């Protein structure tokens, strides 16, 4: 079983998005179940499509990833799903930051923020 860690600022971002997307917690639960298989430390299996899961960077210790967080029954089109950055290290998955696509975020800026938050967790 994986250990899921939420950065404190990630928790605040989720609380803000919860006002706009009432089912964001369902999306997170679904994603955690997928992570149990995709990032299994002994027997990983690809269950998340490569088009949805993007590796930002990695080293010998951790990998930084970005995903389009699917939110079931939300009425959103796939290009409207929130983007979430997380890191994976062994049995630890750290949720770093999340933004809604409608917020007109900058990928490079969010990658930098995720790397800063990653150093807080690992």
Image: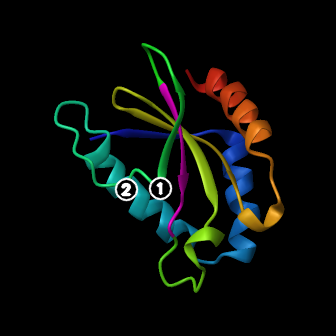
Find disc 1 in the rendering and name its residue. Answer: 52
Q: Is residue 69 above or below residue 118?
A: below
Kindly check if marks 1 and 2 are in contact, taking CB atoms under 8 A apart as contact.
yes
The overriding secondary structure of the stretch rendered in magenta is: strand
Q: Position of residue 9 (x, y in %)?
A: 73, 43
Q: Residue at x 47, y 56 (%)?
A: 52
The magenta span reads 63-70
Left or right of 25? Residue 114 is right
Q: Is residue 45 above or below residue 101?
A: above
Residue 104 or 121: which is nearer the viewer?
104
Left or right of 108? Residue 65 is left
Badge 1 crowding class, 10 Å Cα cut-off, few under 14, some 14 to 19, many 20 or more, is: few
Residue 90: in magenta span: no
Return the mark for residue 65.
none
Q: Residue at x 26, y 41 (%)?
A: 1
Left or right of 111? Residue 65 is left
Find disc 2 in the rendering and name its residue. Answer: 49
Q: Position of residue 53 (x, y in %)?
A: 46, 49
Q: Position of residue 62 (x, y in %)?
A: 46, 22
Of helix, strand and loop, which one carries label 2?
loop
Cα separation, mark 1 vs mark 2, equals 5 Å
Q: Residue at x 66, y 24 (%)?
A: 120
């Amino acid at each position: 079983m994986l250990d899921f860690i939420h950065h404190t600022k990630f928790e605040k971002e989720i609380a803000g998005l919860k006002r706009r997307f009432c089912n964001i917690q369902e999306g997170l639960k679904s994603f955690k179940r997928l992570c149990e298989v995709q990032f299994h430390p002994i027997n990983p299996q690809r269950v998340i499509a490569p088009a949805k899961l993007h590796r930002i960077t990695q080293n010998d210790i951790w990998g930084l990833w970005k995903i389009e967080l699917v939110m079931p029954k939300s009425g959103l089109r796939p290009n409207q799903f929130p983007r979430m950055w997380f890191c994976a290290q062994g049995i630890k998955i750290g949720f770093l930051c999340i933004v809604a696509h409608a917020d007109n975020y900058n990928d490079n800026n969010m990658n930098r923020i995720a790397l800063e938050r990653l150093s807080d967790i690992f």
